[in-house]
Image (cartoon, rainbow, N blue to C red):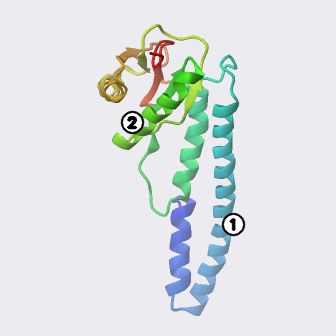
């Protein structure tokens, strides 16, 4: 009974159907009605959280101050709610790498989005979206924030480079250890990437 609502709903549906005792079955049916309402409420929360993520990605201006770490909090909420609705206990989403894409111009967007889809299909990686920024490094970087993520960062940078034909350097950004979820990465494309 301490599991997420999706698991509890599945249990309640099962026992409300197969329990032979009329008295116990009635209690399971009563419990199921409570869980169904909680399930619907969680679905509504998920829908709003997904809209918040899409709105944050699509409406943020390059200088708005919305950074990947803030967006990461929105995405974490979506993953938490999706996990709660699952019919069986799911893996810890903090173990799944997330790569946030940053572009310098709109002409880079289509290729960056294609690259993100390729990365997601090739590896177990989440790419929440592509955000345009007005400043960034002169060379393409895959930034990571925890020294223990170095090997994964190198592997992701190699995979991105292979699919994009770009040179992508993994770069450790100090000062964020413990402040950013594990396996958080940011791809920063230079202003010259994909422009030739």
- Please give left or right for residue 34 compared with residue 128 in the image: right
Q: Give the spatial CA distance, label 2 vs label 1.
A: 37 Å
Mark 2 Cα-neighbour bin, 10 Å: few <14, some 14–19, many ≥20: some
Residue 165, given in percent of the width and then of the height, sits at: 34, 23
Residue at the image point whose x is 63% and y is 45% from the top? 50
Q: Position of residue 99 (x, y in %)?
A: 46, 30
| Residue beneath disc 2 | 119
User: Where does residue 94 sit, x and y in percent of width and height?
Assistant: 45, 39
Quadrant in which residue 71 is drawn: top right
Tell me the SS state at disc 1.
helix
Q: Under tag 2, what secondary structure?
A: helix
Q: Nearer the viewer, residue 101 or 178?
A: 101
Q: Is residue 181 visible?
A: no
- Which residue is at the front of the view, 179 or 50? 50
Q: Is residue 147 left or right of residue 10?
A: left
Quadrant (top left/top right/bottom left/bottom right) for the C terminus: top left
The residue at the far front in this view is: 196
Residue 93: give x, y in percent of width and height.
Answer: 45, 43
Q: Earlier in the sequence, mark 2 or mark 1?
A: 1
The crowding category of the residue bearing disc 1, from other C-alpha atoms within 10 Å (few below 14, some 14 to 19, many at least 20), is few
Residue behind mark 1:
37
Give the answer, above or below, for where 191 lies relative to 85: above
């Amino acid at each position: 009974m301490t599991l997420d609502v999706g698991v509890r709903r599945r249990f309640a549906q099962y026992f409300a159907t197969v329990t032979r005792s009329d008295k116990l079955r009635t209690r399971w049916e009563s419990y199921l009605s409570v869980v169904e309402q909680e399930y619907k409420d969680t679905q509504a929360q998920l829908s709003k959280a997904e809209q918040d993520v899409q709105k944050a990605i699509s409406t943020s201006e390059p200088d708005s101050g919305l950074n990947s770490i803030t967006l990461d909090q929105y995405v974490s909420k979506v993953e938490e709610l999706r996990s709660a609705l699952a019919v069986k206990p799911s893996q810890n989403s903090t173990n799944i790498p997330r790569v946030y894409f940053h572009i310098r111009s709109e002409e880079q967007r289509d290729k960056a989005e294609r690259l993100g889809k390729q990365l997601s299909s090739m590896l177990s990686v989440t790419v929440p979206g592509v955000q345009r920024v007005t400043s960034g490094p002169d060379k393409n970087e895959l930034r990571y924030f925890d020294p223990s993520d170095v090997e994964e960062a190198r592997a992701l940078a190699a995979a991105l480079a292979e699919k994009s034909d770009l040179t992508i350097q993994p770069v450790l950004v100090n000062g964020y250890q413990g402040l950013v979820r594990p396996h958080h990465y940011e791809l920063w494309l230079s202003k010259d990437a994909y422009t030739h």
